[in-house]
Image (tube, helix red, strand yellow):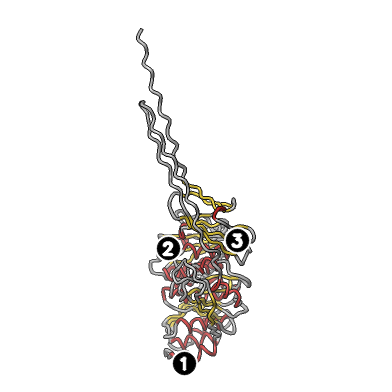
Amino acid sequence: MIKSKKSLTTLAVLSMALLVAPVQAFAADAPGSASPNATVSNSRLSGVDRVGTSVAIAQSGWSNGSTSVIVAPANDANLVDALSVAPLAGELKAPILLTGTDALDPQVQNEIAALGATKVYAVGALSTAVITSLQGISGINVTVMQGVDRFDTATKVASMLQSPAGSFVVGYSGLADAMSVASYAAANNYAILISNPDGSLPASEAAFEGSKVYTVGGPTLVNDISGATRLYGTDRYATNDIVLNDMSYKYDKVYVANGETLVDALAGSALAAQTNSPIILANSTAAYAAADVSKLMTSNSQVISFGGSAVVPDSVVGSIASVTTGTPSTTGTTGTTGTTGTTGTTGTTDTTGTAGTAGNGFTFNTVSDALTGNTIVNVTVTAQGVTGVTVKGVAATNIPTQNMWRASLVGTVTVSASDIILTPTTPTTPTTPTTPTTPTTPT
């Protein structure tokens, strides 16, 4: 039976804590424009434990029930076996429920019945006892997807996807990187594949790469793949920030999960995929991606955390909703137009010099990075022809997806327009004309 909304509400009240509190935020009515008076709502999906949180997530996202359900291990040691499952959840439009590996948790069994599911996909290192319990639920058809290792499991999951558009290849121990891309992969039909410990991709998985391939993590974790785009930062949180910057998400809903335990991110990836929403990974004190994400939210956005306040502290959630966008943007001075080359005097190779490239203005803002204490300077160039940007002598990194250059300055630093130097395209130096040859005097 598919549960009614009334009975769902009763279950939800009993099994999850849903805190809705308006938080003052510097989110914009239009992405990229700050509005210090905007308010972003803040809510929480949680249960008494990680299993209960996965149930709360299912109740929130599948209020009208679900024909299919994915059951995966909740134990830390076995999470890696199920890291590739999010794309299957996206294709089946199914929730991911977590259970202990030794026995089927009663919360999960009850939720399967409440959802009215008829198909259960048991993925990863679940015991025979769990499988037997699932098969014992009336009216349920159980598909067991357990490989001899994590690669085999990833291959079995990928083989279930219908014509995947591409893939994300993560490292052998790349659970955190997989969680950064999980909701995008689930929403956009991308497989998640796992490399060998030496960084190579197993032959069994190579068949599922698809036409667009991303490697997630540094080259020591995942080898270069011809034609692939690499996404990685200095750690899991920086990689998470880069993934959110480079991939296209919708920011009506922004989800937050603990980046150390990662278990709630696995359960939440299927819910986030419903709206092609990002999942921010956070530690106990800060979320590295908060500054970038806040600029893409609107006053109607929602910040939703997975797990209780002990997992994702209220202070971290609040920082994501209310992170400052820094000092008002200031227009930089326009550069000087390059000098036009001089036409040479008559000669066989006289050449006209190329006109210099016009200088470019810019806008910028500064953001205090709560995780490192550094000052992040974002410079947006307002015209073409710039090949580099430095801020107080520090070279900025180009972020093409945001038409932006970014520099990180150590500590709290005040930055003015005069501290920012644009390197324009160098004007072509006029060619010196050849001096005509003096005719030889006849003998």
Task: Answer whether residue 402 is visible to the viewer in this image.
Answer: yes
Q: What residue type is labelled 1?
A: Ser
Instruction: Name the residue at 51% across, 73% down.
Output: 146
Mark nearer the viewer, 3 or 1: 3
| Mark pair 3, 1: CA separation | 50 Å
Q: Identify the image quadrant of residue 197.
A: bottom right
| Mark pair 3, 2: CA separation | 36 Å
SS for callout 3: strand
Q: Which residue is the site of mark 1?
A: 7
- Locate residue 339 relative to residue 256 in the image: left or right: left
Task: Using the image as rendered, state which of residue 311 and residue 320 is in the foreground.
Answer: 320
Q: What residue type is labelled 2?
A: Gly
SS for callout 2: strand
Quarter of the figure that contains the C terminus: top left
Badge 3 vs badge 1, beta-carbon distance below 8 Å: no
Q: Which residue is the site of mark 2?
A: 166
